[in-house]
């Protein structure tokens, strides 16, 4: 048995783990990164980057179809599914290689390959041949796609984001289970590439939206390009020929069936915590084996162990995972050296969906019963100047502030929302009022003027 000692052991080499390892080393700790593979980060390998490559291909096809709006005649759109997926994998592999190149630059004694599990509150077993002693450890093991019970016997007929991007050609039809950010992004991209799409979700909203006006708008926009089955439950699925037959119960209780080439499970990503021996470390475990931990220091109850990134499930988004990794790395180094831990304030919530139109959620969530405590500013893109110029005039904004006008958050559905939402997130983070944000330059003609319209409505309400 090989015996190794370190100050900080980091389990997982994804976004959070890499950031934690680097932060611990910068803080002066001797840190060892334990990687089980396949590596390359969820974002680069199966998440943000390959999905955006698929979205870009779908957007190019849709742009050609809509060229007639501008007086352009594109007589035929032919989608070569194999070529689409070949480019996707080629670019995806380049992103993954960049991550792996960074890991390869680590000193040999700073990295171990294998699966780690806790033997006790100060020791990890890596594979069966290495024991790694630590003063503090960080769990940054990420998450994996959930496969609901009715789909578990479908074999390769059920796809997840871990397998979708490896298929050789586009299917003719695809059932997408889950209308959240991941599911609706992939569903729309596939539909634009000519795949017949049916989306199933137990809820009645898409893309994470909750404001009734935007929920209605999103359902109308996305429903124009695919079949939506909202408020439904998949009750049975079985292999049939080269495809799969799916049975579902609609919200009226009636049973329906359909046949699809493949089904995509996009209904969540639970944390990768099984097999880590968290109980052996003495951690206080809650529901589903999640350690109880301080959401600001990221320190778990019961042992010098921190948990960061998708593994803790707070905000499974790359920028949050990277920040949590830095916090965990610095705090693990502090634990190892006997220094006090930092407890930074959380960032304002910021989540985006890269559909067309895009969607975003910023800051405090929508509350249906908060009318007396909030002022809401509304704006529609249907008649907004720049949106009409581009032929992207659908959706709108709903932004809320307290009664004094201080911005709290909002929801967005429309073109350029990836930029507008960051404007709003910065303002909420800095505690600005609607009037203060409005007193900034808004260039004409831009989509950002739509944000100014909603801010003006709040400012007028405060002034009355």
Image: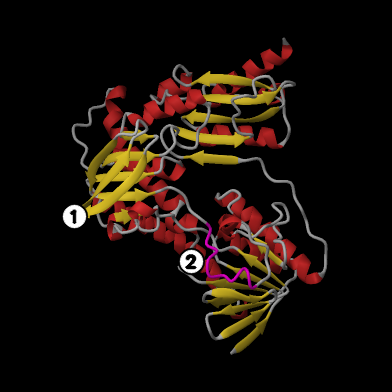
Asked whether the beta carbons under mark 1 and mark 2 sit within 8 Å of each other, the answer is: no
Mark 1 to mark 2: distance in Å? Answer: 32 Å
Question: What's the residue at 74%, 67% (across, down)?
Answer: 333
Question: Would you call the spot at circle 2 few (<14 residues within 10 Å), some (14-19), or many (20 or more)?
Answer: some
Question: What's the residue at 45%, 64% (across, down)?
Answer: 97
Taking the view exactly as shown, the residue that stands out farthest to the right is 339
User: Which callout, 1 or 2, points to the residue nearer the camera?
Assistant: 1
Taking the view exactly as shown, the residue that stands out farthest to the front is 253
Picture coordinates of residue 316 (x, y %)? 55, 50
Magenta residues span 271-280
Q: Is residue 464 visible?
A: yes
Question: As rendered, which of 257 and 49 lies closer to the eye?
Answer: 257
Q: Is residue 455 above or below residue 156?
A: above
Judging by the rendered image, the residue that carries numbered circle 2 is 39
Picture coordinates of residue 99 (x, y %)? 51, 63
Q: Is residue 443 visible?
A: no
Question: Would you call the spot at circle 1 few (<14 residues within 10 Å), some (14-19), or many (20 or more)?
Answer: few
Left or right: where does residue 175 sit relative to residue 437? left
Q: Main secondary structure of the magenta part?
A: loop
Picture coordinates of residue 369 (x, y %)? 62, 24
Judging by the rendered image, the residue that carries numbered circle 1 is 242
Choose top left, top right, bottom left or bottom right for residue 116.
bottom right
In the rendered image, the quadrant that contains the C terminus is top right
**N-term-proximal mark, 1 vs 2:** 2
Secondary structure of residue under mark 1: loop
Picture coordinates of residue 436 (x, y %)? 72, 24
Q: Is residue 114 above or below residue 429?
A: below
On whether residue 57 falls in the magenta region, the answer is no
Secondary structure of residue under mark 2: loop
Question: As rendered, which of 165 and 88 lies closer to the eye?
Answer: 165
On whether residue 274 falls in the magenta region, the answer is yes
């Amino acid at each position: 048995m090989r015996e190794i000692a370190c100050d900080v052991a980091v389990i997982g080499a994804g976004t959070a783990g890499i950031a934690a390892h680097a932060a611990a080393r910068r803080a002066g700790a001797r840190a060892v990164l334990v990687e089980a593979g396949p590596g390359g980060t969820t974002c680069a390998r199966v998440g943000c980057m390959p999905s955006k490559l698929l979205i870009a291909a779908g957007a190019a096809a849709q742009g050609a179809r809509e060229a007639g709006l501008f007086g352009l005649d594109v007589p035929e759109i032919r989608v070569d599914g194999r070529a689409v997926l070949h480019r996707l994998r080629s670019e995806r592999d380049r992103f993954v290689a960049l991550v792996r190149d960074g890991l390869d630059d680590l000193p040999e004694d700073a990295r171990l390959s294998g699966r780690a599990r806790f033997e006790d509150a100060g020791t990890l077993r890596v594979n069966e041949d290495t024991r790694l002693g630590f003063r503090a450890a960080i769990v940054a093991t990420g998450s994996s796609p959930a496969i609901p019970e009715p789909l578990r016997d479908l074999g390769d007929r059920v796809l997840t984001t871990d397998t979708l991007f490896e298929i050789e050609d586009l299917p003719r039809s695809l059932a997408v289970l889950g209308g959240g950010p991941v599911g609706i992004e992939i569903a729309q991209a596939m539909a634009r590439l000519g795949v017949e799409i049916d989306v199933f979700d137990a809820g009645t909203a898409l893309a994470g939206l909750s404001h009734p006006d935007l929920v209605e708008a999103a359902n109308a926009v996305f429903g124009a390009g695919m079949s939506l089955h909202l408020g439904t439950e998949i009750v049975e699925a079985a292999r049939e020929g080269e495809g799969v037959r799916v049975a579902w119960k609609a919200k009226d209780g009636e049973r329906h069936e359909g046949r699809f080439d493949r089904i995509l499970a996009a209904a969540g990503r639970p944390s990768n915590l099984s097999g880590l021996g968290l109980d052996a470390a003495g951690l206080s475990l809650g529901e589903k084996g999640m350690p109880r931990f301080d959401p600001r220091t990221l320190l778990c109850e019961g042992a010098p162990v921190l948990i960061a990134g998708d593994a803790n499930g707070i905000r499974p988004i790359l920028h949050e995972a990277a920040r949590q990794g830095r916090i965990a790395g610095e705090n693990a180094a502090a634990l190892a050296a006997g220094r006090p831990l930092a407890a930074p304030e959380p960032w304002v919530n910021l989540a985006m969906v890269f559909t067309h139109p895009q969607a975003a959620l910023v800051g405090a969530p929508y509350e249906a019963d908060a009318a007396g405590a909030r002022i809401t500013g509304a704006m529609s893109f249907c008649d907004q100047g720049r949106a009409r110029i581009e032929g992207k005039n659908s959706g709108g904004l709903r932004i809320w502030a307290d009664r004094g006008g201080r911005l709290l958050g909002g929801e967005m559905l429309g073109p350029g929302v990836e930029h507008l939402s960051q404007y709003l997130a910065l303002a909420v983070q800095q505690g600005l009022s609607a009037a203060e944000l409005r007193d900034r330059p808004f260039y004409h003609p831009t989509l950002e003027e739509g944000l100014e319209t909603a801010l003006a409505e709040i400012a007028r309400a405060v002034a009355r």
